[in-house]
Amino acid sequence: MEIYFITHNSSKFEEASELANNFSLTMNWKNIEYEEPQGDTLEIIAEKSCIKILEKDLTLANLVFFLEDAGLFIDSLNRFPGPYSSYVYKTIGNDGILKLMENKENRTAFFKSVIAFYANNEIKLYKGITKGKITDSKQGHDGFGFDPIFKPSECDETFAEMTLTTKNLYSHRQKSLRELFTSLTAFA
Amino acid sequence: MEIYFITHNSSKFEEASELANNFSLTMNWKNIEYEEPQGDTLEIIAEKSCIKILEKDLTLANLVFFLEDAGLFIDSLNRFPGPYSSYVYKTIGNDGILKLMENKENRTAFFKSVIAFYANNEIKLYKGITKGKITDSKQGHDGFGFDPIFKPSECDETFAEMTLTTKNLYSHRQKSLRELFTSLTAFA
């Protein structure tokens, strides 16, 4: 089965394709930039994005593909930046989040990933959540986005301090991908 | 001519209807809550919202109506929160913005309002901008949203310290409304 990952983010594709190999799946990258529909939840955004892409390019309806949306939800900030994580990252960045978190005792947060998978005229959602804490300062240079300020529970390193292989043991995206790949290979 | 202002925000309606009276226009309030489409600019969001509402309720096509979208753009934060102002207000609020602005020398910002006006199968946009500064602390209890932390240029008070009448002399929304009302009465 040919599976396409629709994303504009090469790091996301890299993360996903490494895991796909473990499942003996071959993944293809479709670098389509699409305008994300707005929504109060990642689930709504992912599903709507899927529908939007199908409407835009009718040839996709014959393919098997998925896209993914993720966000960082910080408890003491009313779960900001949540579904708007990429916009918030582009504007105020990690420094902005750290500033907002100054003197906050409760530093718990979670990353959530939602995959919308399309095959045979049907969309299915797969989810992954990783709980952790916002650090006091940026740590590490790997990964992307909010990785340098997020330390998963029971880890001593932020996502940005880990090798890709280590990050893949904990990452929210790996959890949603694992759910997807497991369900795909279960019927193979 | 019967004009409808489609908004979920009673304060916005109040601001607008006071000005409409000065133009001898009667405004009606349609309290429709609609899901805002995402977009990189207020212009795109306002126009798309208009189309979305028309698609949702076909009877609106026979009416004359407008809706408005506004945002606060802070120069030293890469124009954050911009088109996502209402979400950012709901999560981190004025305290969050003040935190992000701590020790920032450049405190310039502007409020922008974009109106999408629909009549006779056509959508027209009207805009208003008010330049000013982000204050060091919240001041005043009137208005709504980011009003307590925004002081228009050449004013000694924030929007939240002004009476509605005074605010209307400076507000971005009043400027876009004034543009709209002027064009409507020019042909009356």
Image (cartoon, coloured by chain):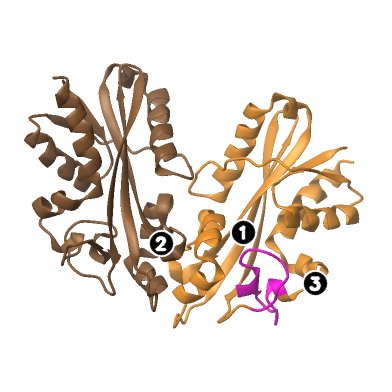
Chain colours: A brown, B orange
The nearer-to-camera label among 3 and 2 is 2
| Amino acid at circle 2 | Asp
C-alpha span from label 1 to label 3 = 20 Å
Q: Which residue is disc 1 drawn over?
A: B112
Residue B103: give x, y in percent of width and height: 44, 83
Residue B179: give x, y in percent of width and height: 75, 52
Looking at the rendering, the stretch of residues picked out in magenta corresponds to: B139-160
Residue B118, quarter of the rendered image: top right
- Circle 2 marks a residue in which chain? A
Q: Earlier in the sequence, mark 1 or mark 3?
A: 1
Name which residue lies at 83% across and 53% down: B17
- Circle 1 marks a residue in which chain? B
Name the foreground residue: B160 vs A188.
A188
Q: Which residue is disc 3 drawn over?
A: B163
Residue B145, quarter of the rendered image: bottom right
Residue B133 has which mark? none
| Amino acid at circle 3 | Thr
Q: Which residue is disc 2 drawn over?
A: A75
Residue A95, quarter of the rendered image: bottom left
State the predominant SS element of the stretch in magenta: loop
Name which residue lies at 48% across and 69% down: B75
| Amino acid at circle 1 | Lys
